[in-house]
Image (spheres, rainbow, N blue to C red):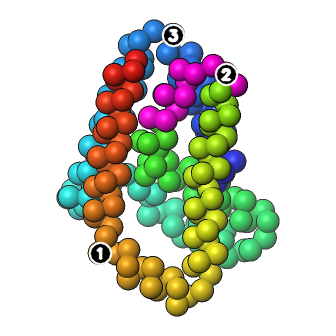
Amino acid sequence: MFLTYLLLGLGVISVVAYLTRTHLPVRILGVLVVILGLWTIKDALFPGMGWTLAMPARFHGIVRKMLGQSTPVGLFAAGGLVGLCTVPCSGAIYMGVLVLLAQQPLLTRLGYLLIYNVMFVVPLLALLVVVANRRTLNRIAHWYIPRKIPAKLAIGVFTVILGFVVLVTA
């Protein structure tokens, strides 16, 4: 996932850095981030209404099959697929961050992109260690399920705010 997000980020940030030479593309991207944040809020409040920002269900079986192989190639492929498929879920915040980073000098932008991706993956690694124990996994699930909607709402609100930050700083 780290490599997928890093490569995706490098590609997107290159395009965004090119586009940010004028203010209109940055403003369009800021509006896109706001829309994605509002969509996340919609998903929290009305989960069955329309398309949701989540990994498509048709990929769940493929990911499970790859993870079941437990080979380096299978795990690498699963991580890459999960990374690509979770872009709709976490991509709104990532896009907002990339737009802000694209306005920085090249080395600063690359350094922050690397830090962002490390900080994105470290909690996933910690979670992997924690969920290796099935009892702990059940406790976390019981704790998280009733808090899922408020968490999604918070992410949506944060994304909308991030979109407005992009619009104001453009």
Left or right relative to 132: residue 21: left
Judge the density around disc 1: few (<14), some (14-19), many (≥20) Cα neighbours within 10 Å: few
- Residue 102 in the magenta stretch? The answer is yes
Kind of residue at disc 1: Pro
Kind of residue at disc 2: Leu
- Residue 98 in the magenta stretch? The answer is yes
Query: Which residue lies at the image location 65% right of the left edge and 27% below the top edge?
Result: 108
Left or right relative to 90: residue 8: right
Say the numbered circle drawn on residue 21: 3
Segment tinted magenta in the rendering: 96-107
Left or right relative to 35: residue 97: right
The quarter of the picture where the N terminus appears is bottom right
Say the numbered circle drawn on residue 106: 2
Query: Which residue lies at the image location 31% right of the left edge and 48% below the top edge?
Result: 156
Left or right relative to 33: residue 121: right
Residue picked out by circle 1:
146
Query: Which residue lies at the image location 52% right of the left edge and 62% below the top edge?
Result: 59
The disc, 2 or 3, on the residue closer to the chain's N-terminal end is: 3
Near-viewer residue (39 or 115): 115
The disc, 2 or 1, on the residue closer to the chain's N-terminal end is: 2
Question: Total marks drawn?
Answer: 3
Measured along the vertical axis of the image, is residue 147 above or below residue 48? Answer: below
Judge the density around disc 3: few (<14), some (14-19), many (≥20) Cα neighbours within 10 Å: few
Near-viewer residue (10 or 60): 10
Marks 1 and 3: CB-CB under 8 Å? no
